[in-house]
Image: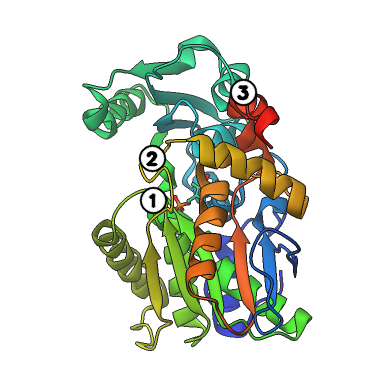
Amino acid sequence: MIFNQPLQQLISSHLDPELNGHSRCHPLYGYLPQNSSAPLFIKREDELNANVVGTKHRKYLSLLPALQHSGICHVILIGSAHSNNVLGLSQMLRSRNYAVTALVKSPGNRALNGNHLLLNMLLPSESIHYISHQAWPFVQQIAEEAAQRLNQEGTQTTVIPEGGYSEAVLPGILTLAGDLQLNSEQLQTEFTDIWTDSGTGVSAIGLLLGMRLLGMTQPRVHITQIAGTPEEFQQRYNQFEQWLETLMETPLPSQRPEVRFIRPATAASYGSINKTILRESWTIARETGLLMDPVYSVKHFYTVKHEMTLNPPSGPQLILYNGGTLGMSGFQSQLASQESIV
Ligand SMILES: *Cc1c(COP(=O)(O)O)cnc(C)c1O
């Protein structure tokens, strides 16, 4: 991986050198309003890893080496039955011979499809513990108690919080800003705006802190908040900022890019899918050649379209495709039922 010096020195020893940290950028044809004063580009974070969505892959770049160095052999994961993080990490960990237990929020629908099916293929049923909705607020505590028991029995165990929110992902999520700089040089294009999406916010926080570290005050960053609130995002940002200052052993430069939060233009509550999202999934596929996961990426692109139509941008625009096609698999029958209306 080629990174700008200060970033390289800080993080390279924390990253798995065998994992890919570079994704390409290319012009985006179709779907978003085309305008010669605002050329559109897409960053293909979906191509980082064929089996894991892009935002999660960057977290694992440093999480996996941290687990390896700590001598952990059993990992407890937390998430919904369709969590991209639980599915992604299960693959990365099982293929490295870690024992994995998943604490999964009981799904409303017990039918095995999408990520839930794939998770069951990866883990035997005794390794998947369904946690009721009533008990879900205590899931982190339940996981920590289970880890404590295993540790007492001599099995070195750790818990990865929901969405991978932990200090060990910090070097990995910082790679995005450096990789963006590389895209910008390769395309000889200075982006004026970046459009990304957020769930826990961890990946977008990595982008913002990485930009600060590199002294980048441009481009402006627009964040479609698929989950959470700006206040929750700010709290997590402050925590990662502290962890970064510990890693750097100096305060971060105070100059930072301008940030704007956007609510999803439709189906605003997290995980919800409506007819618009299903229709847009088809439209995006037909107009751009990209198969996108509905829960994050389609909602994000539809929201960006809405924003760009309201306020036509100027200057080169970069839209991040953070998800992946695999995220569509839980929605096949709903997507199929939309065929007649496209
Ligand atoms: C998890 C996820 C995100 C958001 O990443 P966070 O780091 O949680 O903000 C975006 N898109 C997809 C497809 C995801 O799985």
- Whether disc 1's CB lies below 8 Å from ligand 1 is answered yes
Which mark lies nearer to you, 1 or 2? 1
**Outermost residue to the front:** 341
Name the secondary structure under disc 1. loop
Please report whichever mark, 1 or 3, sits nearer to the chain's N-terminal start.
3
Q: Amino acid at mark 3?
A: Leu
The residue singled out by tag 1 in the image is 200
Residue 97 position, x and y percent, is: 62, 29
Residue 328 position, x and y percent, is: 63, 34
- Residue 131 in which image quadrant: top left
How would you rate the neighbour count of disc 3 (Cα within 10 Å): few for under 14, some for 14-19, many for 20 or more?
Answer: some
How would you rate the neighbour count of disc 2 (Cα within 10 Å): few for under 14, some for 14-19, many for 20 or more?
Answer: some
The residue at the point 74 percent across, 65 percent down is 24
Seen in the picture, residue 197 relative to 217 is either above or below; the reply is above
Please report whichever mark, 3 or 2, sits nearer to the chain's N-terminal start.
3
Split into 4 quadrants, where in the image is the N terminus? bottom right
Report the disc number at residue 162: 2
The residue at the point 63 percent across, 82 percent down is 4
The residue at the point 55 percent across, 45 percent down is 68
Say whether marks 1 and 2 touch (CB < 8 Å).
Answer: yes
